[in-house]
Image (spheres, rainbow, N blue to C red):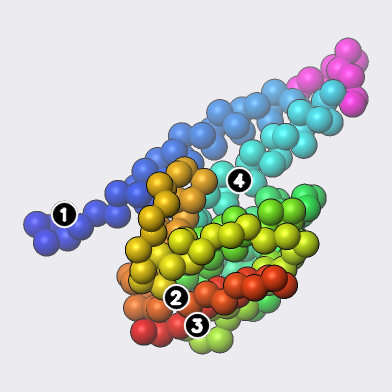
């Protein structure tokens, strides 16, 4: 690493955590398979544990994209992206639709996943999120029965100051600002009673 090169410390941390967690979580899955083969295993309890494990594995895959390292020479295809989103949101109150077709460079996928997390934070009772792309521009639209007031955080995305104390569940907002800047994109938010639209367009 040269003296002028700044390491992506949040990305390194995210990648390290996901890497260290995926092995023990996978081992739990192997243990569940062995238990399922034993006659003493109770189906209902085993299914509950299996569902929780699948959710944990999906979250790790999602966080690896959103918070891990992202290089321009890495890409993700539509099936992998949709599978990752379905694993996290497929069975809950929030449904995410991924419209872009074809491969997406890992830095752009990171941007899109961070945008999804920001919009998700506004949907207090779940709803629907749609992700679309037009060349370099990204658009994430969220609709739901009730929206949280995230005005200070929306201001942060648009270059303003946020007077709220940053909490762990809102860390995606400054990370999105950082990622958009890295990609040369400008963020814009439109929030109202019906939903919220978050856009990233060339600056």
Residue behind mark 1: 1
**Region rendered in magenta:** 34-44
Secondary structure of the residue carrying tag 3 is: strand
> Of marks 4 and 3, which one's residue comes earlier in the chain?
4
Which image quadrant is residue 121 in?
Answer: bottom right
Whether residue 140 appears in magenta in the rendering, the answer is no
Residue 15 seen anywhere in this rendered image of the structure: no
Vertical side of 72 occupied by 69: above or below: above
Rendered residue at 34%/78% (across/down): 184
Q: Nearer the viewer, residue 3 or 35?
A: 3
Q: Which residue is mark 2?
A: 187
Neighbor class of circle 3 (other Cα within 10 Å; few <14, some 14-19, many 20+) is some
Q: Earlier in the sequence, mark 1 or mark 2?
A: 1
* Coordinates of residue 73 in the picture (x, y in percent): 39, 69
The residue where tag 3 is placed is: 137
The circle on residue 83 is none
Instruction: Judge left or right: residue 4 versus residue 199.
Output: left
* Number of numbered discs on residues: 4
Q: Horizontal and vertical percent for residue 105?
A: 47, 71
Instruction: Answer few, some or many: residues within 10 Å of disc 4's Cα (few below 14, many 20 plus, some between 14 and 19).
Output: some
44 on left or right of 15: right
Instruction: Report the disc number at residue 59.
Output: 4
Q: Residue at x 44, y 75 (%)?
A: 187
């Amino acid at each position: 690493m040269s003296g002028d090169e700044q390491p992506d410390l949040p990305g390194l941390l995210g990648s390290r955590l996901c890497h260290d967690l995926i092995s023990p979580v996978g081992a739990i899955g192997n243990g569940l398979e062995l238990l399922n083969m034993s006659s003493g295993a109770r189906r209902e309890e085993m299914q509950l544990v299996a569902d929780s494990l699948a959710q944990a594995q999906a979250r790790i895959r999602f966080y690896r994209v959103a918070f891990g390292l992202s290089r321009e020479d890495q890409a993700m295809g539509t099936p992998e992206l949709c599978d990752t989103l379905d694993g996290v949101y497929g069975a809950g109150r929030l449904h995410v639709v991924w419209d872009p077709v074809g491969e997406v460079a890992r830095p752009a996928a990171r941007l899109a996943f961070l945008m999804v997390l920001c919009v998700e934070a506004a949907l207090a009772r779940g709803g629907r999120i749609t992700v679309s792309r037009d060349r370099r521009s990204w658009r994430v639209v969220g609709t739901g029965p009730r929206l949280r007031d995230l005005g200070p955080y929306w201001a942060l995305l648009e270059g303003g100051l946020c007077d709220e104390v940053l909490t762990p569940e809102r860390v995606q907002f400054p990370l999105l600002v950082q990622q958009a800047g890295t990609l040369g994109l400008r963020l814009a938010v439109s929030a109202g009673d019906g939903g919220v639209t978050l856009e990233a367009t060339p600056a």
